[in-house]
Amino acid sequence: MQTVENFVPITQAKSKLLDMVRSIHDRDDSFAITKNGVPEAVMISMKKFEGLLETIEILADQEAMIQLRDSMADVKRGRTVDADEVL
């Protein structure tokens, strides 16, 4: 699981905003913006944000989750088929 490693006080975030955005773009970093030492907001890339939204959507789909659990159980039991057999 990926965690936020960069913490920036809100008083410094404004002056560091451009550098933070570049770091997010170039190194896929994320930042927690703190207020009085407590994380209040997180800055992540749009790609990562969209991935989180997609994950939430999948997790909220009960039918998709049932199918996923069934598939995971099949793999654990060795009930798999080679891709060549499917095509």
Image: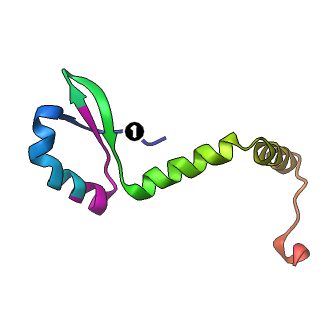
Q: Where is residue 78 in the image (x, y as percent from the top left)?
A: 88, 52
Residue in view at x 89 percent, y 73 percent? 86
Relative to the observer, which residue lies in front, 24 or 86?
24
Q: Where is residue 41 in the image (x, y as percent from the top left)?
A: 31, 34
The range drawn in magenta is 22-33
Query: Which colour assignment does the render follow?
Result: rainbow
Q: Disc 1 marks which residue?
A: 3
Quadrant the C terminus occupies: bottom right
Amino acid type for the residue under numbered disc 1? Thr
Tell me which corner region of the image, top left, top right, bottom left or bottom right, holds residue 27.
bottom left
Relative to the observer, which residue lies in front, 44 or 7?
44
Relative to the observer, which residue lies in front, 28 or 34?
34
Left or right of residue 18: residue 75: right
Left or right of residue 77: residue 31: left
Q: Where is residue 10 in the image (x, y as percent from the top left)?
A: 17, 33
Q: Is residue 25 above or below residue 30?
A: below
Q: Is residue 58 above or below residue 28?
A: above
Tally of marks: 1
Q: Determine whether the residue tagged by mark 1 lies in a helix, strand or loop.
A: loop
Left or right of residue 64: residue 46: left
Residue in view at x 88 percent, y 64 percent? 81
Tell me which corner region of the image, top left, top right, bottom left or bottom right, holds residue 37.
top left
Residue in view at x 11 percent, y 33 percent? 11
Relative to the observer, which residue lies in front, 65 or 69?
65
